[in-house]
Image: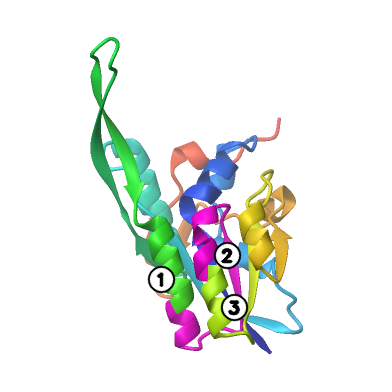
Amino acid sequence: MIRSSFFIDGFNLYHALKRLDGPHLKWVDLMKLMQQQIAPHSEMIADVFYFSAYAYWLPDQKTRHEEYVKALASTGVQIVMGQFKEKERSCLKCKTTWTQHEEKETDVNIALFVLNEAYRNTYDRAYIVSRDSDLKPAVEMVRARFPEKEMYIVAPPHLGHSNDLIQVAHGKRKIKKPQIERCLFADQITDGQGNVIAVRPKEYAPPVNP
């Protein structure tokens, strides 16, 4: 069996999900969704890594994100969190200043994990769920150092692939909306003893059919 590992850019995926018609689709079970991307008779999932960061200055959004991360972790998804940093901006014309938050570390973390897991020989095939062309050098390095390993690029729903990544990959996949709809978490996630681990935020409740 081919050992397949997934490296998911949480922000790339989140912003793609926001473009779909329904916030309930954000409550997606990524372990189950990634199963939709492999050939079950010849592949097995070795690991699923989720890379993101908490928007600490948006408390409601941060709370929803934390609940989602707990749900993901309950399925065996490995969570790798970066951080946002504040950066002061100003307008030279009107002299207005404001604070902008820039996400740091996610693309670096993905690149490091793709490389490190290749050196640890934990996968035969890597799926990178991202459109970030900054990951191109990491893909190129894995292919140069480990020519037996395969690199695939997975595009988020309704978005195209990064041409830079496709040029250096073995192949590509596409997440489709019907796949997401089939892979949503329940309203509550419990452990083996029935303890509640995570609860779906009310904003992510599915639409009620009339």
Disc 1 secondary structure class: helix
Dot 3 or dot 1: first in sequence order is 1
Q: Label 1 belongs to which residue?
A: 112
Q: Which residues make up the magenta segment?
A: 116-138
Q: Nearer the viewer, mark 2 or mark 3?
A: 3
* SS category of the residue bearing label 3: helix
Residue 112 visible, this orientation: yes
- Picture residue at 57% right of the left edge, 85% below the top: 146
Q: Give whichever of 75, 141 is nearer the camera.
A: 141
Distance of label 2 from label 3 (alpha carbons): 14 Å
Residue flagged by tag 2: what amino acid is it? Ile
Observer-side mark, 3 or 1, equals 3
Amino acid carrying mark 1 in the image? Leu
What residue is disc 2 on? 128
Is 77 positioned to the left or the right of 175 in the image?
Answer: left
User: Of callouts 1 and 2, which one flags the residue occurring earlier in the amino acid sequence?
Assistant: 1
Q: Is residue 126 magenta?
A: yes
Q: Residue furthest top?
A: 94
Residue drawn at x 72%, y 68% is 171
Cβ–Cβ under 8 Å for marks 1 and 2: no
Residue in the picture at 35% in, 52% down: 53
Q: Which mark is residue 143?
A: 3
